[in-house]
Amino acid sequence: MKSSGFGQRLKELLQQKQLTLTQVAKSLGISTPSVHRWTNGGEIEYANLRALAAFLDVNWVWLRYGDEAIQDLKETLVPESGAQDLRQKYLGQIIDSEARMKLAYDAARIATWEWQVLTRELTTSPDAEQIFGKPLEAIRPDLLPFEPLPLDRLVAQFADGGEIQEWDFCMPGTDAGSGQGEGIEHDERWLSCRGQLIYDAARRPLKIVGVCIDITQRKAMEKALRRSEYMMRKVIETIPVGLWIADESGHIRIANPEAERIWGGARLVELAHYGEYKGRWESTGKEVGGEGWTLARAILSGEASRGEIVNIDAFDGQQRSIVMSAIPLLDDDGRIIGAIEVNQDITSLKQAEASRGRSEYRWRAMFDQPMVGIAWLESGSDILHANARLAELTELSGEVLARQALASLFDEATGKSLRKHLKSAEARGTREMLNIAGRVRRASGPGPEVLVQVVSQGGGEEGVFRTLVFVSEMQRVG
């Protein structure tokens, strides 16, 4: 019998022994389509290979790998005493190679499958349904999106066998409408598949072989990241301070809507062109200059600046007064990777003289920055969330602050204005803002003068802030 492919050798053996596919399948306890797939050269697991070889009474290595494999083994049978060990070594390598591949697939929870072009038969690895979590027929349209295509379009889609196609699909859970989970519906499953069209020796489309892996966790992380970025963008757009972010070279990359309002526009320029922004120090009347802006100093020397008052000439022709602050952004090795600057418009509160600038440590560090006291209340909750700076100003611990009413943190007049503001926003169900100068109330006596800015929105969704407060100690910068 001539050596050929596994499928051809199996066909010839069945003809010699006058056996049908059904007889072989029944003997091995498998399906007839599986035996048919083997006769076409389909993959066969090691246990089935050994059982098939025993049933046909042939050498399993020859059946799977042909005469050349047997000849290679014979050539290793030298008369030295280690001949038997050497033969076992090569046999072991063949077995181990297939075992390692199966182990790798099992460990990575990878399902393998084959789809026959002519018969439309789909066969999978034994653990496929366990990985999919559903019967094959329930997910077949998503697993095989190419199945309805005519042959010419199928070949074109798989680029003549030279391209591996990739696709993802989602399997909704049984209670997907419950809304449980973080960013992904409860029990929702995502799978990523890769498939390749295989041709026979005559270049006829034979089958598509593919693998699928569960990517539910990755999809959940991606959705959670998008949600986090969305919330941070909304906070940046909402906060009543101008925010500027520059990269390590000083190139301005981000200016939020409040920054554009304060300056009558925004120019995202490089450090060398910061001179396009014009301003004078409140205390001396001297020009700030391109390298005098707090953002420039943070980039050039790593300087953190707080509450510096400048009178600016905005791009819309208006003159405004701002409190500017900046902080450099450092990596784990202490290198400057960028900087942020915040501008607070104090034009209408010029009599306050100076205000400690509000800052935000990039997007995620806004609440933890040490320059401005920040507090917020969620819709549906009376727990006051406050940062370390506000705790310092009020001389109260975070636990004590959480139980305080917002208005109780300030002098009587300021507290009264805050209560009126909160009540109005809640009653109208609209967003309202309040700017007021007052004094912090401390157990040890009157606290420092502060500038309090509040934005409230009535009727907000649960889990979203209903009141956001910025408290800055006022000081004079000389």
Image (spheres, rainbow, N blue to C red):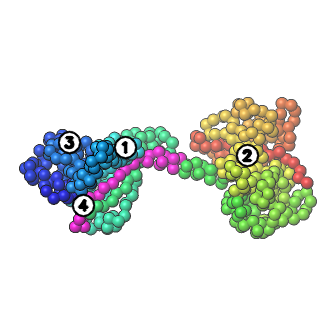
Cα separation between marks 1 and 4: 27 Å
**Discs 2/4, front:** 4
The circle on residue 103 is 1
Q: Nearer the viewer, mark 2 or mark 1?
A: 1
Q: Which residues are magenta?
A: 200-224
Which numbered disc flags the more N-terminal residue, 4 or 3?
A: 3
Name the residue type under label 1: Leu
* Dot 2: element: loop
Q: Is residue 138 visible?
A: no
In the rendered image, which residue does mark 3 sit on? Answer: 51
Instruction: Name the residue nearer the viewer: 224 or 46.
Output: 46
Compare marks 2 and 4 and give the one earlier in the sequence: 4
Q: Quadrant of residue 69?
A: bottom left
Q: Residue at x 66, y 51 (%)?
A: 363
46 drawn magenta: no
Q: Residue at x 55, y 49 (%)?
A: 225
Inspect this view and state whether residue 131 appears.
yes
Q: What numbered label is drawn on residue 206?
A: 4
Q: How many marks?
A: 4
The amino acid pointed to by label 3 is: Ala
Q: Which mark is residue 369?
A: 2
Left or right of residue 380: residue 250: right
Marks 1 and 4 close (CB-CB < 8 Å): no
Q: The disc labelled 4 sits on which kind of residue?
A: Leu
Residue at left offset 18%, top offset 49%: 35
Q: Position of residue 470 (x, y in %)?
A: 75, 45
Mark 4 or 3, closer to the camera: 3
Q: Position of residue 467 (x, y in %)?
A: 68, 43
Amino acid type assigned to the residue bearing label 2 in the image: Gln
